[in-house]
Each structure stands twice: as structure tokens, then as C-alpha cells.
Image (spheres, grey):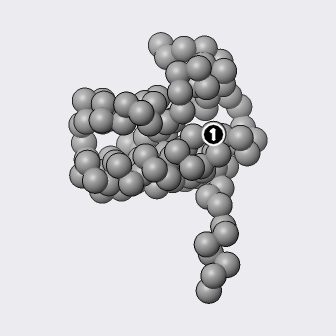
């Protein structure tokens, strides 16, 4: 029963689920510098310290959000905040540090 407490989200499985989810959004909540160093293509970036901006960028509160950061800690916090803001389908998928797919570098376009 306690073993589930030690299970970390699997970002690779989370990205696969995001790709299969129509209208889903992959939300990167790391800093601007971290995002520019390498991010998952097509991800939306909102620094967790500015998560209130989500209401201006992600207007549909029913949109499925797949949230990640570097290790999974900030994304867990962001999920709590997003739920308090009224988003109904929010999932922490963990940290990009264990992501095995392609990343791209550079700032938001």
C-alpha cells in the first residue's frame, strides 16, 4: 500500500499520453533559462513562479494539461496551483531530466 508513495511519474509515458490526447497541452513550468537549454517540441512554457499567466494563455479550464519541470517537484506544485485556479484535467508527468526523447533548444517562438 505504501509503495505507490515512492513511484515517480514517468515523463516518457506522460509524453506518449499527451500525444494521444486530442487538444492536450504539454506544459513546461521550468525557468526561461532551463526552457531555452532544451525543451520538448510543442510544449507550452509558463514558469511556475508566473503560473497565474495560465489563465491568459490556457483559457479552456477543461483542456487536458500534462505538466512537467526538471525533476517533478515544481510540476507537482504547479498542478496543485492549476487545480486551485479551476483547471479540471491536470496531471504531473514528472521531470525532463529522465526524458529520453528529442528536445530542441532556444527561446519560445
Numbered-mark total: 1
The secondary element bearing badge 1 is classed as loop
Compared with 48, 8 (above or below) is: below
Q: Position of residue 8 (x, y in %)?
A: 65, 61
Residue 66 vs residue 48, the one in the foreground: 48
Left or right, residue 33 beside residue 54: right
Q: Residues within 10 Å of mark 1 (few under 14, many from 20)?
A: some
Q: Position of residue 19 (x, y in %)?
A: 53, 45
User: Residue 106 appears in which quarter of the rendering?
Assistant: top right
Q: Position of residue 108 (x, y in %)?
A: 49, 16
Compared with 43, 24 (above or below) is: below
Compared with 71, 105 (above or below) is: above
Residue depicted at x 25% and y 29%: 56
Residue depicted at x 63% and y 82%: 2
User: Residue 5 appears in which quarter of the rendering?
Assistant: bottom right
Residue 20 in view in this figure: no
**Mark 1 sits on what residue?**
70
Residue 24 in view in this figure: yes
User: Residue 96 appears in which quarter of the rendering?
Assistant: top right
Quadrant of the rendering where the N terminus is positioned = bottom right
Residue 75 vs residue 39, the one in the foreground: 75
Compared with 26, 108 (above or below) is: above
Q: Residue furthest front?
A: 49
Residue depicted at x 45% and y 30%: 47
Residue depicted at x 32% and y 54%: 83
Amino acid at each position: 500500500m505504501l509503495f505507490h508513495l515512492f513511484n515517480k511519474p514517468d515523463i516518457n509515458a506522460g509524453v506518449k499520453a499527451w500525444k494521444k490526447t486530442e487538444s492536450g497541452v504539454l506544459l513546461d513550468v521550468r525557468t526561461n533559462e532551463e526552457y531555452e537549454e532544451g525543451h520538448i517540441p510543442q510544449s507550452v512554457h509558463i514558469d511556475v513562479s508566473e503560473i497565474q499567466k495560465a489563465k491568459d494563455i490556457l483559457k479552456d479550464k477543461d483542456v487536458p494539461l500534462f505538466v512537467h519541470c526538471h525533476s517533478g517537484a515544481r510540476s507537482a506544485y504547479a498542478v496543485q496551483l492549476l487545480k486551485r485556479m479551476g483547471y479540471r484535467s491536470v496531471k504531473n508527468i514528472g521531470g525532463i531530466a529522465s526524458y529520453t526523447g528529442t528536445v530542441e533548444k532556444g527561446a519560445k517562438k
